[in-house]
Amino acid sequence: MTGTVELYSPPPHSEQLLVSFPAEHVMMLTLNRPQSRNAMTLQMQKDLETLLDWFSEESALWVVILTGAGKLFCAGADLIEWNKDQQSGKSEEQERVASNRYGFGSISRRQLIKPIIAAVNGGAYGGGTEIVLNCDIVVAGEDAKFALPEVKRGVVAAAGGIPRISQISGHHFAAEMLLTGKVVSAIDAHVRFHFVNVVVPPSEVVSEAIRVAKSIVANSPDAVQCTKEALLLSQSYNLEEAFMRSTFSSKSSRVYKGENIKEGLKAFTEKRSPAWKSPAKL
C-alpha cells in the first residue's frame, strides 16, 4: 500500500471538502471554501459526517488530519446565513444543537477512537476553535490565531467548546477566552491555554501534521485505538470506572487477543520493526 487516493473509495461528497491520502493509513480532509474563510455550511457539515463515518469503519485508515484551504483553517459558522434566519424569525438553535450528535462540523462532539490531528493554517474562530479543541493533536502555524468570540455576537460556544476548553485549560483560562471573546496567538494557545501541541512556520503546518500522523501509524493500531478510547472514557468517568470500562472494553479484548500484540512482542525479541495489520472488525 502506498497511501495514494486510488487505493481507497471514499463516499461521494461536494467540492466543499477535499479528500486525500498523504501517507499510508492516513486520510486528510481539507475544508475547501477559501473565499469564505472556510466558514461551515450545512453541505460541508454533511460531507464531513459522511467522510468521517466512512473513515471510522475503514480498517486500513488509522489517522485523520483536518486542515483548511487558503489562509484560514475555519472561521466558524456562516454568520450571514445565521443572521438571515434570526431576522426572519427562525430560531431553532437549541433543537439543532441538541439533535446534532457530532457537534459543529460533525467533529466538535464526535467521540472517535481513531486519532484526529488538526493542521491549523491561519487560525480558527468560533466553531472552528471548537473543532480544534476536540482534536487529539494540534499543529499550528506561527501566524495562527484562535478565538471563541460567540459572546461578541450574542451567541454561545454551545457545540462542545465550553466543557472542552474548561477541561484542557482550567476554569480561569477558559473563562478568559469564553467571557471576553478575545483572540489568542498560537504561542499563547500552546503555552498558556495548552490546546496547541506544536507551533511551526506556516509553510510547515501540513508537513508537520503528516510527520506526526506517520509517528502514530508506526505503532499498533489496536493499541492506539484502545488508548484513545481510554482517554475518552477518562473525560466522562472517575478514575476507577474509566479504568474498569477500558480494561474490559471490546477494544481492549482486541488488543490482547489479536495478532498485533503477538507481532509487536515477537518483533521486539527479534530486534526488528513490527509489521502491523489493520485492526479486526469488532
Image (cartoon, grey):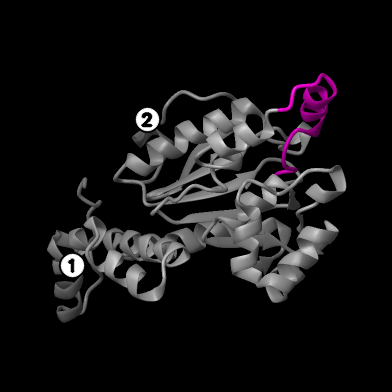
Q: Which mark is residue 131?
A: none
Residue 169 in percent (x, y) is at: 66, 71
Residue 66 in percent (x, y) is at: 56, 47
Please give the count of numbered marks on the rendered protein: 2
The amino acid on which the numbered mark 2 sits, given as a three-letter code, is Ser
Up-down relation of residue 195 to residue 152 (above or below): below
Q: Is residue 40 magenta?
A: no
Distance from label 1 to label 2 (Cα)? 29 Å
The amino acid on which the numbered mark 1 sits, given as a three-letter code, is Ile
- Using the image as rendered, state which of residue 25 and residue 62 is in the foreground: 62
Residue 143 in percent (x, y) is at: 79, 60
Image: magenta residue range: 74-91
263 to the left or right of 134: left
Query: Would you call the spot at circle 2 few (<14 residues within 10 Å), some (14-19), or many (20 or more)?
Result: few
152 to the left or right of 38: right
Q: Secondary structure at mark 1?
A: helix
Q: Secondary structure at mark 2?
A: loop
85 to the left or right of 129: right
Give the residue pinned by disc 2: 9
- Going 75% across and 43% down the picture, which residue do you hit? 75
Image depth: mark 1 or mark 2 in front: 1
Determine the image quadrant of residue 245: bottom left
Up-down relation of residue 280 to residue 34 (above or below): below
- Residue 206 visible within the image: no
Give the residue pinned by disc 1: 261
